Image (tube, grey):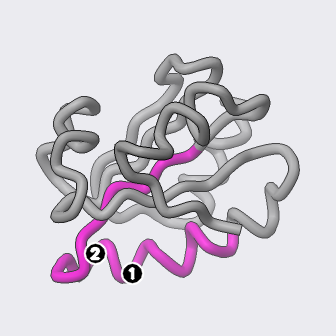
Amino acid sequence: MVVELNKNNFEQEVMKSSVPVLIDFWASWCGPCRMVSPIIDELAEEYSGRLKVCKVNVDANSELASEFAVVSIPTVVILKNGKVLAKSVGAKSREAFSDMIDSAI
């Protein structure tokens, strides 16, 4: 399951999460974001229970994007206990995202 994040649920979903959180920063007009989206959805299923997967639409939630210094999308960030463990900018392979997740959980 993928959680759509906004400023109202960010604290609860991310900062208070008992498992690491992957956040995918994206926008509907971004071609590479559309390529990465199905990969992120698959990883949400694969890591279910061990990782929470969230998405942030940067157009609707620019303040969250600013908090994470997102200047290019897609940007994927992994947090654990509220701290950034990994950050990746640009479209990557499924294996690259899996490696990033494996090193964080």
Residue 97 on image: x %, y %: 56, 53
- Taking 86 as reference, is 99 above or below it? below
Residue for point 21% across, 63% down: 60
- How far from the left and from the top, in percent, is residue 48? 83, 58
The quarter of the picture where residue 41 lies is bottom right
The answer to whether residue 81 is above or below residue 13 is: above
Residue closest to the far front: 8
Residue most toward the left? Answer: 71
Write down the residue under mark 2: 32
| SS assignment at label 2 | helix
Q: In the rendered image, which quarter contains the C terminus?
A: top right
Residue drawn 16% across the image and 64% down it? 59
- Quadrant of the rendered image containing residue 68: top left
Q: Residue at x 65, y 27 (%)?
A: 16
Which residue does the numbered mark 1 point to in the structure image?
A: 35
**38 or 1, which lies in front?**
1
Q: Residue 100: x, y in percent? A: 59, 41
**What SS does tag 1 mark?**
helix
Pointer 1 with pointer 2, Cβ within 8 A: yes
Residue 97 tag number? none
Observer-nearest of 7 and 2: 7
Q: Whole-Å distance between the Cαs marked 1 and 2?
A: 5 Å
- Amino acid type, residue under disc 2 in the picture: Pro
The image quadrant that residue 27 belongs to is bottom left
The residue under label 1 is which amino acid type? Answer: Met
53 on left or right of 24 = right
Q: Which residues are magenta?
A: 22-42
Mark 2 Cα-neighbour bin, 10 Å: few <14, some 14–19, many ≥20: some
Q: Residue at x 58, y 66 (%)?
A: 94
In the rendered view, does 46 fall on the left or right side of 98?
Answer: right
Quadrant where the N terminus lies? bottom right
